[in-house]
Amino acid sequence: MFLSRFGPRLGRYDVARTKFVTLPTDQDILRHMNNGVYLSIMDVARFDMLMRNGVWDIFKQRGWYPVVVSETISFRKSLQMWQKFTIESRILGYDAKAVYVEHRFVRPDADGKPEIYAQGFIRGRFLKRGGGVVTIDELLEAVGEPPEAVTVPEWLLEWSDDVTLPPTRAAAPSVWN
């Protein structure tokens, strides 16, 4: 939160760039960044994005908070100890219940251009501190409609349908086939 105050302000749907360095505590036994750490760092980058694009202030005023419903990540190259990297984050859009965010872990290639090391996607919902779920209509009324260019890829919507668990009040027995 402290560092977000120094980053440039963003439009709601701009790409946020958050800088990190791979620390010794991020390493697994093979001496590269542990796969679980990527997901935790995505949380920090997403919070930075929400602070800098002004959405976090709206959430605080209304007593809302975000939760991750599902996430997926693909790895291309390993991040080694002490390597600097940037997470590029952007809001992709919405479906009837949730928001989708893309995260890219990037480092400069030999020509200095950003090269993707890993790419993650989250599907998130918003809850009310007093109880209940924030609807997409409520969310869009608060943050504004997205530009036409902001769309969720069809494959991501299908993925979301494929991995969705039953609602919290429905039965979800653990039965192995």
Image (tube, rainbow, N blue to C red):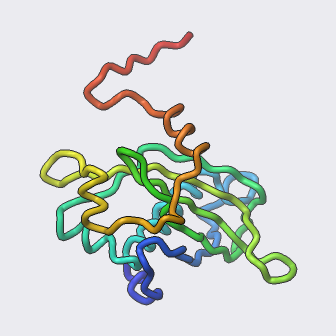
Residue found farthest to the left: 130
Specify whether 176 is left or right of 58: right
Left or right: residue 170 compared with residue 121: left
Residue at x 52%, y 47% (from the top left corner) = 71
Q: Position of residue 148 (x, y in %)?
A: 49, 64
Could you say where residue 103 lies in the image, as x and y percent from the top left?
Answer: 58, 62
* Residue furthest to the right: 110
156 relative to 114, above or below: above
Choose between 165 and 99: the one closer to the eye. Answer: 99
The quarter of the displayed image where residue 57 is located: bottom left
Q: Residue at x 36, y 65 (%)?
A: 145
Q: Quadrant of residue 167?
A: top left
Quarter of the image with the N terminus is bottom left
| Residue 95 place in picture, x, y as percent | 42, 47
Q: Is 82 located above or below residue 118 in the figure?
A: below
Q: Residue furthest top?
A: 177
In this picture, residue 170 sits left or right of residue 40? left
**Who is closer to the viewer here, 95 or 40?**
95
* Residue at left offset 64%, top offset 67%: 24
Q: How many marks?
A: 0
Which sits in the foreground, 102 or 24? 102
| Picture quarter with the C terminus | top right
The residue located at (60%, 55%) in the rendering is: 120
Query: Which of these two is toward me, 43 or 143?
Result: 143
From the top left corner, tell me how far across and down residue 109 is, in percent.
82, 76
